[in-house]
């Protein structure tokens, strides 16, 4: 490349590597013309071995959910404001995959690592994930966790229990007394927290614990559909509400109600959690808890791009959702 342009290797490197050192226009032009003629492409991985890249690496359990899509989109927009970009990797929430992914990404020296997961455990694999992240941060990187406050890094979490308590209290205040909670699976910590929050709100509002049923199901639209279809109509009894731990489950339950001829909300109230875009488009419009996913994505990037004094304690931030009334809920009188 340098020989083709008739310049030194150092000059060619400065032009193609985006060095802050000035190169005379006539030499820069010759290097760029030679690069075009030779179809030169920068070796990003090799460059990353020499310095930090402009990437912010996001590590998530699953990249297909509507909520993570909103977070990633907001992260990307915020990163672009400082000429950075976001890369994404999925681990399915498996500890071994989390460790392997972090170790691989850290080798490319991104500006920051943002981990979003409901399945991060500080003690998993003997603490090796924490050790890997600590070593990366000690080398000048930044680590931000979205999903929990247990790890020794800047973190943002949603208070799922307090957020769900709002919905439980609202159901009780609107006269519901025999709800069924579609609780997801026991391995999802956020689902367990939301279930607990629902119970607390319902009981505080006067609902008898014996009148609350909890049904586990897959955390998906299909899971909600199958769980509701199993209940409807023969096993529904005198239940007056289905409280799902996320909107996907609730939307599946709504579909099962339509198929079984169960009218929502006149016969049965259905509620969700997350306020994904589809929640506003289904009929009836879903009553749900809104989480500020876009704001969380923006805040994660801002934290990731802020230098942190290692002598100070990590930043801990907690977000609580807001109730979004919809047509899928109808007050009850007994």
Image (spheres, rainbow, N blue to C red):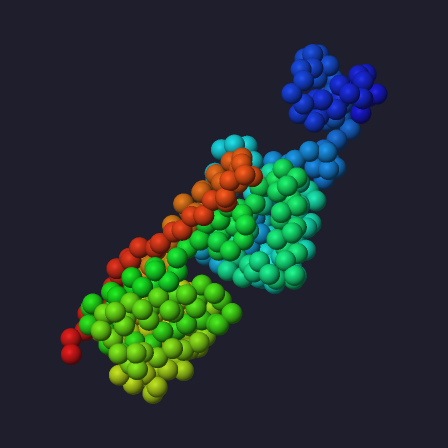
Left or right: 257 with respect to 87? left
**From the viewer's perspective, is residue 49 above or below residue 183?**
above
**From the viewer's perspective, is residue 240 above or below residue 117?**
below
**From the viewer's perspective, is residue 261 above or below residue 250?**
below
Residue under the image location 26 percent in, 83 percent down: 238
Residue under the image location 67 percent in, 23 percent down: 19
Q: Position of residue 219 (x, y in %)?
A: 47, 68
**From the viewer's perspective, is residue 318 above or below residue 163?**
above
Q: Quadrant of the C terminus?
A: bottom left
Q: Position of residue 163 (x, y in %)?
A: 34, 59
**Is residue 272 shown to the viewer in this render?**
no
Left or right: 108 with respect to 286? right
Name, please, the residue furthest toward the front.
Answer: 311
Q: Position of residue 197 (x, y in %)?
A: 35, 66
Name, please, the residue furthest toward the bottom.
Answer: 234
In this rendered view, identify the residue nearer to me: 223 or 3: 223
What number of labels is visible? 0
Name, please, the residue furthest toward the left.
Answer: 333
Residue under the image location 61 percent in, 53 percent down: 130
Name, please, the residue furthest toward the right.
Answer: 3
Left or right: 95 with respect to 296? right
Q: Position of residue 59 (x, y in %)?
A: 58, 52
In this rendered view, identify the residue nearer to me: 225 or 167: 167
Left or right: 55 with respect to 271? right
Quarter of the figure with residue 228: bottom left
Q: Quadrant of the N terminus?
A: top right
Residue under the image location 33 percent in, 71 percent down: 199
Quarter of the figure with residue 143: top right
**Is residue 139 shown to the viewer in this render?**
yes
């Amino acid at each position: 490349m340098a020989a083709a342009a008739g310049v030194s290797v150092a000059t060619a490197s400065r032009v193609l590597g985006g060095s802050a050192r000035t190169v005379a226009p006539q030499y820069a032009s010759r290097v760029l013309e030679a690069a075009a003629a030779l179809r030169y492409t920068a070796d990003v991985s090799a460059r990353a071995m020499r310095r930090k890249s402009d990437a912010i690496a996001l590590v998530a359990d699953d990249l297909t959910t509507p909520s993570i899509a909103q977070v990633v989109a907001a992260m990307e927009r915020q990163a672009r404001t400082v000429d950075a970009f976001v890369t994404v990797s999925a681990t399915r929430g498996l500890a071994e995959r989390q460790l392997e992914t972090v170790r691989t990404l850290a080798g490319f020296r991104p500006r920051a690592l943002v981990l979003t997961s409901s399945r991060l455990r500080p003690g998993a694999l003997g603490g090796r994930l924490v050790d890997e992240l600590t070593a990366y941060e000690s080398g000048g990187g930044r680590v931000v966790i979205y999903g929990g406050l247990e790890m020794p890094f800047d973190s943002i979490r949603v208070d799922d229990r307090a957020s769900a308590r709002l919905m439980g209290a609202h159901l009780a205040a609107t006269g519901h007394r025999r709800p069924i909670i579609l609780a997801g699976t026991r391995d999802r910590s956020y689902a367990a927290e939301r279930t607990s929050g629902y119970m607390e709100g319902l009981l505080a509002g006067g609902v008898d614990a014996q009148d609350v049923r909890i049904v586990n199901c897959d955390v998906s639209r299909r899971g909600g559909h199958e769980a509701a279809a199993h209940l409807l109509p023969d096993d529904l009894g005198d239940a007056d509400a289905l409280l799902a731990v996320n909107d996907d489950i609730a939307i599946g339950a709504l579909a099962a109600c339509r198929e079984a001829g169960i009218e929502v909300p006149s016969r049965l109230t259905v509620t969700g959690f997350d306020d994904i875009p589809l929640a506003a488009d289904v009929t009836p419009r879903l009553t749900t808890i809104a989480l500020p996913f876009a704001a969380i994505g923006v805040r994660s990037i801002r934290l990731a791009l802020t230098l942190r004094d290692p002598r100070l304690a990590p930043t801990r931030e907690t977000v609580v959702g807001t109730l979004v009334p919809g047509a899928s809920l109808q007050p009850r009188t007994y």
